Amino acid sequence: MTPLSARLALLFAVGLSALPAAALTTIRLAYLEEARVATNPLANIEPVPDDLGRAGAELAIGDNNTTGKFLQQRFELARIQVPAGASAADMLGKLQKSGAGFVVLNVSATAIDRLMAQPAAARYLWFNAGAPDDRLRQNQCRANLLHTLPGRAMQADALAQYLVTRRWNKWFLVSGPRPEDRLYAAAVRRAAKRFGGRIVGEKTWNYGHDARRTAQGEVPVFTQVGDYDVLIVADESGDFGDYLSYRTWLPRPVAGTQGLTAHGWHAAAEQWGAVQLQNRFRRQSQRPMQAVDYAAWAAVRSVGEAASRTGSGEAAKLAGYIRGPAFALAGFKGRTLSYRPWNGELRQPIMVAQPRSLVGLSPQDGFLHPRTELDSLGFDAPEVKCQP
């Protein structure tokens, strides 16, 4: 380097150091969860993780900050846990102290009802990552409530498309006695009407919750209902569904909440860069990523994506962008994801899988839609009875 070029380089460096540093923008989010009620699951091989959902939000905060450091943006996550049945005032009080403008929810639908009924709820953009209840997406939607966890209708539609593609059109529906089982069964009936499935038999499991010692004798008798292609089980709590496979009177596959299932994420996903997300999550949490983890991850990443695209940290501006037509999130599913303007549900492919392998991805080929094939899953605009 010549003396002249050296002096020029020194002057350039001094000039740069004299420039004011760009202000760091802090974007605050909160993760609000209800404490889990202690249970004794029958299939206790894989207990429910203590950090289910929260681990996905924490991974996404790290992802946001990786990009944000180049844009002078910093993302912070407040972790808030409340007892089951906590009052809306208690939850909102903790949120106000956090200073967050965006809230990822892993709470029950009734807790969401309590929150949304409060005038103070209008201050936040909420992401539902834990409640699959369809009423929140069909007739009780809110303008500031988005859903990253697929509702039961999306799950049932994804499964139905796969079954109809395989020409397994005759279904035997077995429902548990719990309210959530009845809601899942209702979603299956709706999916059957939409896609050409036919429910040829339907029963409610009434042998009690503990099927471990009696299933070998009870299930063959219980499943004598004539011919069918697939048994669809609605047992969200796992009381008996795991004990139906290989015990039915006819040798038929089991699908629904056990057996062949449909969810927003599965630990066996590998395509479209998914293995990279799986590996990072496993290194962080020492376990596979589950659907609720992915829903929380997608919620936090939605805020990060909006911040990087707009270059803003203003909550109202980010919320408007997330709900607008320009928003697109890369979700490791081969399609960009966006939010439906009529009910706030995240458009996303749904993974159809058995416990240890991915079987398919819905929407299946041939199920068309005038807007996007992703809208063939869940509630389309004419089916929604509310204006968010």
Image (cartoon, grey):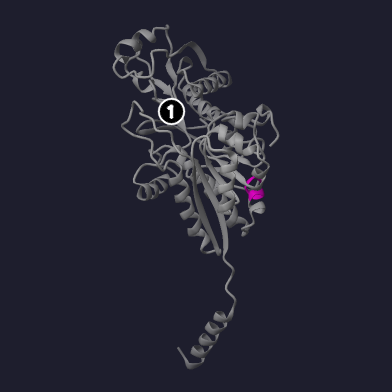
x and y, in percent, of residue 48 in the image: 38, 36
Query: Residue 261's quadrant in the figure?
Result: top left
Query: Image height check: is 184 above or below 22?
Result: above
Instruction: Name the residue rendered at 43%, 12% in the picture.
Output: 228
User: What residue is shown at x 66% (from left), y 53% (from top)?
Assistant: 317
- Name the one closer to the observer, 214 or 339: 214
Can residue 313 be seen in this snapshot?
A: yes
Q: Position of residue 292 (x, y in %)?
A: 47, 39
SS type, badge 1:
strand
Residue type at mark 1 is Thr
Q: Residue furthest right?
A: 387
Tell me what residue is drawn at x 52 percent, y 82 percent: 13
Q: Nearer the viewer, residue 387 or 85?
A: 85
Magenta stretch containing residue 323, yes or no?
A: yes
Q: How many marks?
A: 1
Residue highlighted by disc 1:
261
Q: Residues within 10 Å of mark 1 (few under 14, many from 20)?
A: many
Q: Can the viewer see residue 304 in this picture?
A: no
Which portion, as a residue range, is magenta? 319-324
Which quadrant would the N terminus be assigned to in this image? bottom left
Q: Assign the C terminus to one quadrant of the image.
A: top right
Q: Position of residue 360 (x, y in %)?
A: 44, 32
Q: Residue 78, image x and y in percent?
A: 51, 52
Is residue 84 shown above or below 42? below
Q: Is residue 242 magenta?
A: no
